Amino acid sequence: MSYRDTYEAWLASPALSAGEKAELEAIKNDEKEIESRFFSQLEFGTAGLRGTMGAGTYRMNVHVIRHATQAFAEVILAEGPEAVQRGVAICFDCRNNSDTFAREAACVMAGNGIPVRLFESLRPTPELSFAIREYGCIAGINVTASHNPKEYNGYKVYWEDGAQLPPRHAAAIAAQLARGEALPQAVALAKSYVTTAIAHALPLGGGCGPTNHFYRLYQRGLEGVR
């Protein structure tokens, strides 16, 4: 399928929001912009995904997040039922759409029967790494693009040790992604998972004050390495 064919398929998809459809309609006569958005998929590596936000396969958006999370979920499912029950922790930063992307990831994980611990408010990466180890999660996701410009966002993945995903697991996710086109209708399954996600998600605190249970655990962990 050419980049133009993929663009047309996205434009015709009922899974697009009105805003996404308008965004793609606005570039229908801009061949270079269409090519830049649809010539390929974002490449998945040990650090996950990173790219400019917008509609398209080579952009960060809810459809790409769902697609990547489904691939990640399948890698976790392949680890067996004990690994699945350990669940995942998910956090996000203050960038535009970070909270939305984090919730979409939580929905897909929960829809696959993987328990989710979703932070209620923005957190730095070290707290996610701590949460993975403290709660015995099999993996974690942080929606952040670190130091990159505001137009960017990222999807960083971590394994049970709180460090970046091992190369073999990253390669397995990349292989899963390569098996299917990231078309909206193919990855919109997350929309049906919202109720399930709410039932499975275990919030990790709404504040950073000393009365917050998670924060107290985190502070105790820091004291142990001083």
Image (tube, rainbow, N blue to C red):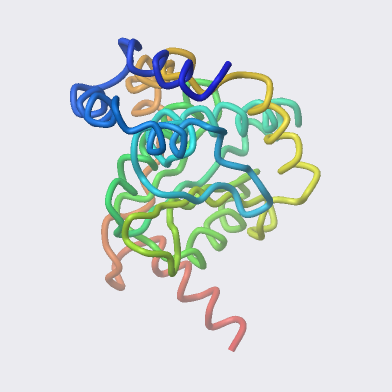
Left or right: where does residue 82 sit relative to residue 24? right
Compared with 195, 220 (above or below) is below
* Res 40 quadrant in image: top right
Q: Nearer the viewer, residue 40 or 208?
A: 40
Question: Which residue is at 47% across, 67% downward?
Answer: 217
Please provide percent x and percent y for residue 188. 41, 18
Left or right: where does residue 182 sit relative to residue 31? right
Question: Which residue is at 38% across, 38% downward?
Answer: 33
Please provide percent x and percent y for residue 148. 42, 65
Compared with 1, 144 (above or below) is below
- Image quadrant in which the N terminus is located: top right
Please provide percent x and percent y for residue 61. 38, 37
Q: Residue farthest to the bottom?
A: 226
Q: How many marks?
A: 0
Question: Which residue is at 40% across, 49% downward?
Answer: 52
Left or right: where does residue 163 sit relative to residue 57? right
Please provide percent x and percent y for residue 150. 32, 61
Q: Nearer the viewer, residue 21 or 115?
A: 21
- Image quadrant in which the C terminus is located: bottom right
Q: Residue farthest to the right?
A: 168
Compared with 182, 12 (above or below) is above
Q: Nearer the viewer, residue 50 or 217?
A: 50
Question: Which residue is at 71% across, 43% downward?
Answer: 170
